[in-house]
Amino acid sequence: MSPAHNLRSMIQPAAAWLVVIAALTAVLTGCRGTSASSNDEVAGAAATQPLTVTAQATDVPSATHVEPNTQSRNRITAADGFVSEQAPLSPFDDGHPAIANLSPQLRLALQDAAIDAGTAGIYMLVNSGWRSERYQQSLLDEAVVTYGSTEEARKWVNTPELSTHVTGEAIDVGPTDAAIWLSQHGSDYGLCQVYANEIWHYELAADSAGNCPEPVADASSG
């Protein structure tokens, strides 16, 4: 056997193995490529989908769940003398029941005081005036909830039977500088602070000499 023949016999098996190895490499490479391609496709598809966030349930009160005092207040209108905290009245707003239903003497005294306060740079407003009986009762009901008992509530809100707001003989004025001004000058108009704990509450209580009585402690005292 010639040397060339010997060399050929040695190369052929090695070449065969090289072919096998190359085939296996191709298969493996194809698998990896397919896998990578599939992953890329999945990633690409995910990237085109909108992100969805699932919100956690929270304990939000229902819009229909309203405290009893708020339900009561919702039935009260301007016809009952209701005055919004965000929109107090001018003392000259005679078209509003809270002003129109005051006693004529109190309304006139209030307006005279408001004019003079204005010349002193004090702008007087009315937070509450005349009230219907049911409005007064709703305020008392709210106060009972707020203060925890009728006894404590009565220190701030009178019953409809005793309230001078219901009879049109009381006003609550604001802002604070106007209430302070009235506490200093109100007797000139017959207007007196009648409750020590309510600087805003005034009634025609001055005597013929223009003297105001000492305020009582609170509404439950009168």
Image (spheres, rainbow, N blue to C red):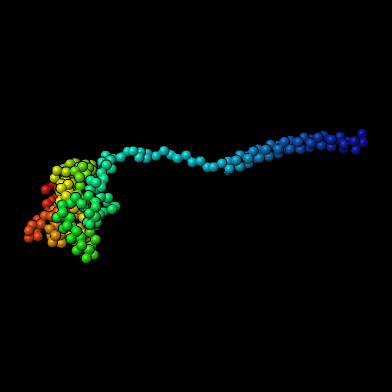
Q: Quadrant of the N terminus?
A: top right
Residue at the extreme front = 95
The residue positioned 81% from the left and 37% from the top of the image is 15
Against 115, residue 5 (above or below) is above
Rendered location of residue 20, percent (x, y): 77, 35
Q: Which residue is drawn at 26% across and 54% down?
A: 88
Task: From the top left corner, tell me how far across and down residue 165 is, in percent.
Answer: 17, 49
**x and y percent of residue 160 in the render?**
16, 43
| Quadrant in the rendering for residue 158 | top left
- Residue at point 22% right, 57% down? 92
Tell which residue pokes out farthest to the right in this image. Answer: 2
The answer to whether residue 87 is left or right of residue 167 is right
Q: Residue furthest left?
A: 208
Is residue 92 at least partly visible in the picture? yes
- Position of residue 33 relative to residue 128, above or below, is above
- Residue 155 visible here: no
57 and 132: which is toward the camera: 132
The picture quadrant where one finds residue 55 is: top left
> What is the x, y in percent for residue 11?
84, 37
Q: In this view, does 179 lie above or below 49?
A: below
Query: Residue drawn at (79%, 37%), measured in percent from left and top?
Result: 18
* Tally of numbered tags: 0
Residue 193 sits above or below residue 33 on the image: below
Name the quadrant containing residue 90: bottom left
